Amino acid sequence: MTSSITGLGELPLLVELGAALLLSSLIGLEREVRAKSAGLRTHALVGVGAALFVLVSKYGFLDTLTWPNVQLGPSRVAAQIVSGIGFIGGGLIFVRRDAVRGLTTAATVWVVAAVGMACGGGLLLLAAATTLAHFIVVVGYQRLVAVLRGAMREPRVVRIGYLDGHGVLRNVLTLCTSRGWAVLDLQVEREDSDDDQQRTAVVALRLRGKHDVSGLVDELAVLPGVLHASAGDSGENGF
């Protein structure tokens, strides 16, 4: 006995299958551009496969409805997709030293399966909204985290030994501000005055900025009149 949905009756289902292919390919393209382990082809196949499983679950056994004492449960196949996709996701996650890699890609494959299932179930608007949510999370959230990390970056302390009385500190402050660093506070840690001609001082600057402080330290170290420069934590030396 064959299914009651055959031939031309299957053509409307191609819309749902095509939607799964399109949406999963969009998500896979983003992963491909970022050179992730699971790219365009993997996501497209997962999305289309999940959609086909749901379509088969919904329409592939309609002829059995005429059988006595037969109850169909289309959600059973969907449940197996949810559990089965974990094997693919688990293969994408690996540990390198102390860093865990592939979690986002594995989660993306899981979402693609859900998008395919939604397309197979005829919930095209919901599938499209989920695809949009993927791009918001993966692209938008990454930029948001970068902004928040920059805004919440802890101040850094730079200690500078220099020749006092030669305008060196003014040049140091000018360089810091020109490189995008905000000078929150400064404190003279030590001042040596045994020789009036070569009087030296050590000042600690508490700075906040979005760039790597090591580059600033290298520039400060070569300024005329600067004897040494180093970076430390904001909690050191009274700050």
Image (tube, helix red, strand yellow):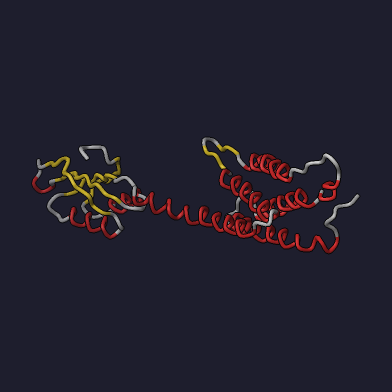
Q: Is residue 49 left or right of residue 184?
A: right
Rendered residue at 26%/58% (across/down): 177
Residue 223 lies, in percent from the top left, at 25, 54
Q: Quadrant of the C terminus?
A: top left
**Would you identify the image quadrant in which residue 75 lies?**
top right
How many labels, in total?
0
Query: Depth check: 54 or 29 in front?
Result: 54
Query: Depth check: 207 or 51 in front?
Result: 51
Query: Depth check: 200 or 140 in front?
Result: 140
Residue 130 lies, in percent from the top left, at 58, 55
**Would you identify the image quadrant in which residue 161 lies?**
top left
Q: Residue furthest front?
A: 68
Residue 139 lies, in percent from the top left, at 51, 56
Residue 59 visible? The answer is yes
Q: Is residue 37 above or below residue 233?
A: below
Query: Depth check: 95 or 105 in front?
Result: 105
Rendered residue at 64%/49% (across/down): 114
Residue 44 lies, in percent from the top left, at 69, 55
Q: Residue furthest top?
A: 98
Q: Is residue 60 left or right of residue 47?
A: right
Rendered residue at 19%/45% (across/down): 203
Q: Is residue 222 above or below residue 15?
A: above
Residue 41 visible? The answer is no
Rendered residue at 89%/52% (across/down): 2
